[in-house]
Amino acid sequence: MHVLRTPEERFSNLPGFPFEPNYVHVTAADDVTALRMHYLDEGPPDGEVVLLLHGEPSWSYLYRTMIPVLTAAGRRCIVPDLIGFGRSDKPAERADYTYARHVEWLRTALFDHLDLTGITLVCQDWGGLLGLRLVAEHPDRFARVVAANTGLPTGDAALTDAFAAWQRFSQESPVFPIGSIVEGGCRTSFSPEVRAAYDAPFPDDTYKAGARSFPLLVPTSPEDPAAAANRAAWQRLREFDKPFVTAFSDGDPITAGGEKILQREIPGAKGREHPVIEGAGHFLQEDDGPGLAAVVNDLIDATPAH
């Protein structure tokens, strides 16, 4: 496996991002290549763990306005960069990326290395496709879930037209401008500096194999390589009775309506208030990060761990 690593100077002086990097090395069951995964570890070491998982094509920078709100409330924020994104290593070939490998890379980092327990998961986009798999397969590690603009597709139901259009663009567009793509999924406009911060992990197109591969890894047919594992995960999620809240935005055409499935199928979501983040697009952390962080704090305060 040929692996690229973004030069560290690309991450110097990013606006609103004063956090120190941390690293672990991870492997997947079907490939022994050791890859360096980056994560943030902010807040008191003994605080309740809040795991913030980003999606496509963003990185931990997405959570920069939420981390201070959470740490001020005494939470310990763990914010990984998925392999292929942010400060994490980037295998150079699209074939190097599979759904199963992403799950295993993340599991190795969070459980084998960091040994996290009592986790409150906050997941958006691919953060949910991976995070909800981990919840299903390791429920004892998790205390609560806040799902935002995400889901766990099995390929048995059609995805939205907006997703189909995005999938086509991701494969057919000769240019793949990461910062502009993230901005296009927001209601707010970016400064040039913020747009550049989203571009920072990708010095050129050779670093974008992971970002280009993710849209094709979403199960869109019952025969998809990840479909069976996701169906099995749903069976376990239908038994997950710990606190589960959806906090979808009111302006995301890609995941619109997905919250109803989660609320209907997961026992821990029953009888709970499921706030809507108003005036926000797909990347609601950009449009109202403090608002989403407040939802997380409120859920933890309302459901103390025993």
Image (spheres, rainbow, N blue to C red):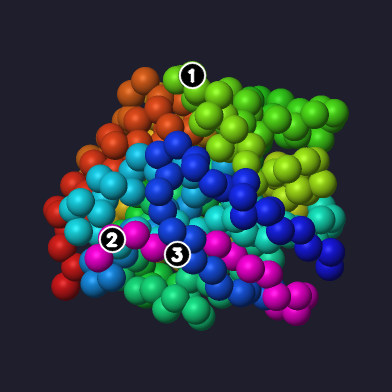
Mark 2 or mark 3, earlier in chain: 2
Front residue of 52/226: it is 52
Give above or below for 170 relative to 22.
above
User: Could you tell me which secondary element the residue under label 1 belongs to?
Assistant: loop
Position in image of residue 66 (x %, y %): 33, 43
Say which residue appears at 84% left-offset and 68% top-offset.
1
Whether residue 79 appears in this view of the structure is yes
Q: Which residue is mark 3?
A: 135
Q: What's under tag 3, amino acid-wise?
A: Val
In front of the other: label 2 or label 3?
2
- Between the C-alphas of marks 1 and 2, the distance is 29 Å
Q: Which residue is mark 2?
A: 43
Q: Is residue 295 left or right of residue 21?
A: left
Mark 1 or mark 2, earlier in chain: 2
Front residue of 150/96: it is 96
Q: Read off the magenta span.
A: 29-44
- Between the C-alphas of marks 1 and 3, the distance is 34 Å
